[in-house]
């Protein structure tokens, strides 16, 4: 059976009523026949049938044994860090999601869990950073916003040899394109807020484990810490996942066409897209993913924040907002938005130049998206001399999420 058919039919028909859409069990508790005698559910933090349906769908989608749904992507990441003990070390990709960096540095550091950041797009850097205390390797591939690619299979081999856990944040690729567990990862996490939800209408996080034993440990933490996803959002996330493969196909097609368009535009300096043969991670991405995703980043020849501001305020279809993976195309300017709080030198070292712009290709028609980018780039040329007059974006409204 093909992947889409499998996905659609992994969503259960309600055993009680035959409802073809998973019912929303909006309840806090479940009546018991006698103390401890119940129908599989006792209290809705521990388990809820709507959430259970989602967790099972996502576990199957990632090819894992156990799924756990959380209130946000960060709550999912938090649960994985809690598998560790004081004194343990994490080796992580050096340009991980800013919220994961904040969690590691500003929450877990004080509990004695420390992180070494290396460029995992060269797997030998991971090997070199390991110590006897390393208990977890953490990567994203592709990364945000320069779309660096790490070799999942190679790093899985290093993790196995060292006897530590290996977790992949699969948010940017989605399981429609990339299945880290099949390549040897122990854990996958998602911000369900992005491609899995797909409609920019919810915040959610997911963990999928390869082994049932690890799954039990994550489920214990999910119940013990309590950052669960509610039944309505669980239902909404299932609803989004139903069309994942269809949506991802279109996101990839538009992003590929946009990358090709940007590459030949005279106002554009560098285009970052793993589908381009010039991208340093192209060969690895082609080998481990079915497609190159819906995110394209690029820098301008005029490498200033003013030029980037002029561009991101000139697009009409691409809405200026943080986040990605929804039906509406989004544009963001990391230097003033998601990466605003990162020290300038560190930001630039990570390849996030002043003019770097990130696009999330939505589901509009590709030619309309390209026309929108063309008019905004052309306007940039016309306005070249007046950039200084475009006032800066209000900083309060753009604080890092
Ligand atoms: C958005 C995001 C997260 C955090 O997810 P939330 O749902 O916003 O908590 C984690 N990792 C990546 C790669 C993301 O893009």
Image (cartoon, grey):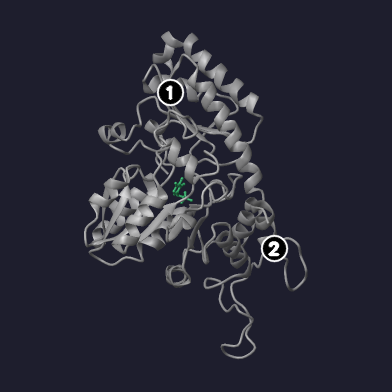
Q: x, y percentage for residue 176?
A: 58, 48
Position of residue 264 measured from the top left corner of the image (x, y, whole percent): 50, 17
Q: Is residue 151 left or right of residue 132?
A: right
Q: Residue at x 65, y 56 (%)?
A: 7
Provide residue 116's location: percent of width, then percent of height.
Answer: 25, 50
Quarter residue 149 falls in: top left
Tell which circle, 2 or 1, labels the residue nearer the N-terminal end.
Answer: 2
Q: Nearer the viewer, residue 118 or 324?
A: 118
Between 220 and 157, the one nearer to me in the picture? 157
On screen, residue 251 above or below 69: above
The outermost residue toward the bottom is 34
- In the picture of the structure, the residue carrying the numbered disc 1 is 308
From the viewer's perspective, tell me whether residue 78 is left or right of residue 130. Answer: right
Residue at 60% x, 26% y is 369
Ligand 1 closer than 8 Å to label 2 CB: no
Question: Where does residue 20 sit, x and y in percent of width and height?
Answer: 76, 62
In percent of the image, x 63 and y 42: which residue is there? 247
Question: Going by the picture, which residue comes out furthest to the right?
Answer: 18
Q: Quadrant of the C terminus?
A: top left
The part of the image, by quadrant, that contains residue 374 is top right
Q: Nearer the viewer, residue 46 or 129?
A: 129
Image quadrant assignment for residue 338: top left
**Residue named by callout 2:** 22
Instruction: Locate residue 316 relative to residue 343 in the image: left or right.
Output: right
Secondary element at image label 1? helix
């Amino acid at each position: 059976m093909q992947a889409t058919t499998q996905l659609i039919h992994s969503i259960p028909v309600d055993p009680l009523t035959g409802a073809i859409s998973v019912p929303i069990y909006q309840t806090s508790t479940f009546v018991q026949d006698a103390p401890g005698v119940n129908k599989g559910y006792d209290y809705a933090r521990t388990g809820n049938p709507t959430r259970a349906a989602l967790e099972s769908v996502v576990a199957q989608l990632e090819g894992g044994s156990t799924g756990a749904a959380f209130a946000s992507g960060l709550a999912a990441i938090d649960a994985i860090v809690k598998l560790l003990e004081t004194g343990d070390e994490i080796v992580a990709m050096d340009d991980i999601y800013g919220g994961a960096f904040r969690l590691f540095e500003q929450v877990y550091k004080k509990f004695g869990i420390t992180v070494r950041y290396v460029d995992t797009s060269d797997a030998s850097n991971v090997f070199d950073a390991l110590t006897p205390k390393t208990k977890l390797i953490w990567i994203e591939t592709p990364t945000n916003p320069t779309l660096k690619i790490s070799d999942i299979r190679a790093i899985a081999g290093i993790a196995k040899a060292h006897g530590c856990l290996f977790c992949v944040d699969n948010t940017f690729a989605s399981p429609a394109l990339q299945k880290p567990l099949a390549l040897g990862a122990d854990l996958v996490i998602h911000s369900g807020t992005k491609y899995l939800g797909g409609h920019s209408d919810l915040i959610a996080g997911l963990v999928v484990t390869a082994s049932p034993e690890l799954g039990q440990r994550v489920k214990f933490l999910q119940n013990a810490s309590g950052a669960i996803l509610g039944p309505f959002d669980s239902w909404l996330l299932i609803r989004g996942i139903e069309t994942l493969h269809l949506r991802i196909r279109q996101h990839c097609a538009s992003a590929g066409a946009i990358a090709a368009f940007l590459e030949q535009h005279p106002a554009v300096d560098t285009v970052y897209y793993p589908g381009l043969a010039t991208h340093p991670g192209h060969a690895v991405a082609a080998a481990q993913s079915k497609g190159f995703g819906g995110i394209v980043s690029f820098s301008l020849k005029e490498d200033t924040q003013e030029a980037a501001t002029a561009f991101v305020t000139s697009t009409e279809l691409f809405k200026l907002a943080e986040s990605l993976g929804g039906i509406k195309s989004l544009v963001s300017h990391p230097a003033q938005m998601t990466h605003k709080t990162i020290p300038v030198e560190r930001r630039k070292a990570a390849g996030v130049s002043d003019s770097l712009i990130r696009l999330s290709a939505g589901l509009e028609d590709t030619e309309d998206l390209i026309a929108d980018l063309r008019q905004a780039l052309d306007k940039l040329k016309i306005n070249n001399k007046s950039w200084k007059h475009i006032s800066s974006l209000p900083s309060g409204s753009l604080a890092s999420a």
